[in-house]
Amino acid sequence: MLSYCKTNLFFNLISIAIFSFLNFACALHAPLSEAAIFNDDLPETENFRSIMKSSETRLSLTKSFYSYSFRNKYLLANDGIVDSTMNPLWQIGLSGYSFLLHPSKRLTIGINPSLIINAGIDFNYHLGHDYYLTGIANTLLSSELIFQKKLFHSNVIQGSLGICYRNEKQEFRNLSFDSVVGRKFNVEMYGIRYLMNFNLSNRELRTITAIYFENIYQTPVINIGLSYNGLFIKN
């Protein structure tokens, strides 16, 4: 019992520490609701108690990578300052303590409270057979819509492949990152996305690899992600 309490305290402290840094990450988080793609027996959340029980320390980190070609073409087209660069904080997505809601057999919802200013929500809807529709959005007005198909489903490793539309807010700042407010803009892109899920003793490790082409300058954008779900140990 003492060991269990110590473990819970340890992971709660980790969660609080990560939670306090979430305001520095501005990009979309990895969708929590995709757990439903690889788990057919998620418990339904029917009341407040079941909603609270669905909360766990689900740690996820995503990162977008833009090419130098995009930077140069954007600055040339928008009379940008030569010594400016893209703000890396708008290319990092992070989630910590979260809620996974399963209100119906087909619909699953993930809620990432963050620090309100960059909170996020996502959903996953089972269209039928092995096809799913997944959406993500945050309060900073970035969003993504994914149509995906589950490719294989073993006891240990599962995978899905999807086509997606992503609208990602970005910002240019000067290299000194002083107090001057940068120029924020939206980047629209289309691409393909590969998701892998690994079952590790009732815990889940998921990896995301996506390749996009942004709509205006036709330059590539790569997004990768890693999430580990279920660190908070329950009875």
Image (cartoon, rainbow, N blue to C red):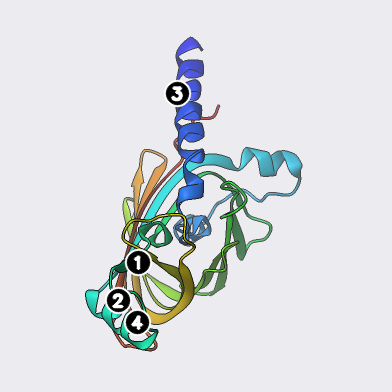
Residue at image mark 2 = 71
The answer to whether any part of residue 208 appears in the image is: no
What percent of the width, then of the height, locates residue 80? Answer: 36, 78
Disc 1 and disc 2 in contact, CB within 8 angstroms = yes
The answer to whether any part of residue 113 appears in the image is: yes
Disc 3 and disc 4 in contact, CB within 8 angstroms = no
**Sequence-wise, which precedes: disc 3 or disc 4?**
3
**Sequence-wise, which precedes: disc 1 or disc 2?**
2
Disc 4 and disc 1 in contact, CB within 8 angstroms = no
Q: Nearer the viewer, mark 3 or mark 4?
A: 4
Disc 4 marks a residue whose amino acid type is: Tyr
Describe the element under mark 4 as helix, strand or loop. Answer: helix
Disc 4 and disc 2 in contact, CB within 8 angstroms = yes
**Sequence-wise, which precedes: disc 1 or disc 3?**
3
Task: Give the CA separation, mark 1 to mark 2.
Answer: 7 Å
Residue at image mark 1 = 86
Q: Nearer the viewer, residue 152 or 60?
A: 60
Residue at image mark 3 = 10
